[in-house]
């Protein structure tokens, strides 16, 4: 059961590498990350109460697990689940961009 | 007036008057006081605005303050100098009259805020990386002391909830170590430290009442607040409002609540509940919870009007376009309005006739008449966040 869930999750998350978005949606997500994620992770994403999110800091993490953290949060820490506010495709886009170096 | 006294007066006026600056630099303002000045953080551009609350106008913009996400400011006792604490560890001393940076140091890798001692001599910064506090001379910004925050668990901790206490003392909490420390600098740069351990899980912010009696730290890792009665002969930690989420789901928190600016009003403390659409009312006599107020969404700041009758409240993402007004006397929400997208902060004029509200995503500061609720003016500002008026210079714990 666990295994099939995992496979399903991988299938869901890996179907698009970096989803193609309209320029508007990219701008909205960029602002969301810089401004609202930035309230804990810092506007420059070098960290604060939350962990730093620069490509260097995230080198050991793959984009899929990052997207899962964005969607479902980290229990026991202030990292909330963003599922409901953003889509899975949004989370994948954010994760990929964080790994590459997040746009300004 | 004889010649000697005239000269003395001229020198005195010249010192206080940028308009007479010998270097011919353009003055930002004629001779004036500072009691109706303020400083507004423009978080995305590393700039601050100097503003005039009487004329409701921007006096000047100052650039070059670094990363100002989550920046805060305190004022020296003359109200001339502001000390701005940036996220990147920058500590900048801003001359409010000359409208320029007086001094600037990078004091840490990652900072959360600061405080100033009651005598105005010491500036203290609270840091995330490396964790701990650092102490600076308020005139020169020379470093006087560095106090690491190694908890009983042996870990270096982020420090949060730093406030000043009378007698060159400061209180702060250790986020990663579940401790509260009081650092006493009355005898010099090496502090006497008083440590309270096991105060509760993950203290995320704290504040002290205006009489410097009650220090209250919000706990993220459990429901409730760690409280210390600093007037007690032997201060100890107890819990306030413990278990306020019991029996109901704790909602995801998209912006941590702040205790800065909390409301002390009518013998009641009004504080944001973490993970609920509520403010909690705490009786200042008994330090027991005495009620809960249902709100529009999760509160971030609960700011008391200076007379204490009303508390104005803003909210976390994604409901942060709204402000609500609580009448503490009747315990009713008496006004709800929507200034615009991303209301980040509110600051009352010193005697509370107007309130300034930063509306980040509209790039605007809105100024409201507090009694009529009418908007009196709008000022352009680039992604504004914190608003700090010079009257803070004379309040403890801010």
Image: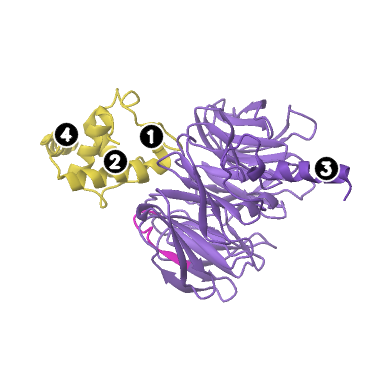
Chain colours: A yellow, B purple
- The chain containing the residue under callout 3 comes to B
Question: Which mark sits nearer the N-terminus, 1 or 2?
Answer: 1
Question: Which mark sits nearer the N-terminus, 4 or 1?
Answer: 4
Left or right of B214? Residue B153 is: left
- Work out whether residue A80 can be spotted: yes
| Element type at mark 3 | helix
The lab-note entry on whether marks 1 and 3 share a chain reads: no
* Residue occupying image coordinates x 40% and y 64%: B339
Q: Which residues are magenta?
A: B316-324
In the picture, the disc for residue B167 is: none
Give the camera-side residue of B92 and A36.
B92
- The chain containing the residue under callout 4 comes to A
From this view, report whether residue A61 is shown above or below residue B19.
above
Q: CA distance from mark 1 to mark 3?
A: 50 Å
Q: CA distance from mark 4 to mark 2?
A: 22 Å
Magenta-drawn stretch contains B328: no
Q: Which residue is mark 2?
A: A70
Q: CA distance from mark 4 to mark 1?
A: 37 Å
Q: Which residue is mark 4?
A: A3
Q: Which residue is mark 3?
A: B8
């Amino acid at each position: 059961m666990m295994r099939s869930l995992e496979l399903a999750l991988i299938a869901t998350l890996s179907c698009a590498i970096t989803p193609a978005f309209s320029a508007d949606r990219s701008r909205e997500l960029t602002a969301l990350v810089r401004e609202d994620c930035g309230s804990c992770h810092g506007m420059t994403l070098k960290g604060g109460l939350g962990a730093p999110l620069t490509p260097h800091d995230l080198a050991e993490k793959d984009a899929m697990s990052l997207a899962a953290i964005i969607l479902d949060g980290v229990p026991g820490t202030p990292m909330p689940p963003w599922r409901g506010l953003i889509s899975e495709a949004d989370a994948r886009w954010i994760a990929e961009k964080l790994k590459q170096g997040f746009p300004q | 007036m004889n010649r000697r006294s005239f000269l003395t007066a001229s020198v005195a006026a010249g010192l206080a008057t940028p308009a007479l600056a010998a270097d011919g630099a353009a003055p930002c303002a004629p001779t004036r006081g500072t009691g109706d000045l303020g400083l507004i953080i423009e978080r995305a551009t590393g700039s601050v605005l100097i503003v005039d609350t009487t004329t409701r106008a921007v006096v000047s913009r100052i650039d070059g303050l670094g990363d100002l996400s989550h920046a805060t400011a305190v004022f020296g006792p003359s109200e001339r100098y502001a000390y701005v604490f940036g996220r990147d560890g920058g500590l900048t001393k801003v001359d409010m009259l000359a409208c320029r940076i007086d001094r600037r140091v990078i004091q840490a890798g990652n900072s959360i805020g600061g405080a100033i001692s009651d005598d105005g001599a010491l500036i203290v910064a609270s840091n995330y990386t490396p964790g701990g506090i650092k102490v600076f001379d308020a005139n020169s910004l020379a470093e006087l002391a560095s106090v690491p925050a190694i908890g009983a668990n042996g870990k270096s901790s982020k420090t949060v909830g730093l406030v000043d206490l009378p007698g060159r003392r400061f209180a702060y909490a250790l986020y990663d170590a579940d401790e509260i420390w009081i650092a006493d600098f009355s005898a010099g740069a090496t502090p006497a430290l008083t440590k309270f351990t096991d105060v509760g899980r993950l203290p995320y912010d704290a504040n002290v009442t205006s009489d410097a009696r009650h220090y209250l730290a919000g706990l993220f890792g459990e429901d409730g607040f760690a409280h210390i009665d600093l007037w007690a002969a032997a201060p100890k930690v107890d819990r306030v409002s413990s278990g306020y989420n019991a029996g109901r789901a704790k909602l995801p928190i998209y912006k941590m609540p702040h205790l800065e600016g909390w409301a002390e009003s009518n013998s009641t403390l009004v504080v944001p509940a973490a993970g609920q659409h509520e403010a909690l009312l705490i009786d200042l006599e008994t330090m027991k919870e005495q009620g809960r107020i249902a709100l529009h969404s999760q509160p971030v700041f609960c700011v008391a009007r200076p007379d204490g009758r009303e508390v104005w409240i803003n909210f976390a993402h994604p409901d942060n376009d709204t402000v609500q007004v609580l009448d503490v006397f009747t315990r009713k929400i008496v006004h709800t309005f929507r200034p615009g997208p991303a209301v980040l902060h509110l600051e009352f004029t010193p005697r509370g006739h107007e309130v300034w509200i930063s509306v980040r995503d509209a790039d605007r500061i809105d100024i409201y008449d507090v009694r009529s609720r009418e908007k009196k003016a709008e000022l352009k500002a680039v992604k504004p966040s914190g608003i700090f008026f010079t009257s803070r210079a004379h309040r403890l714990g801010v």
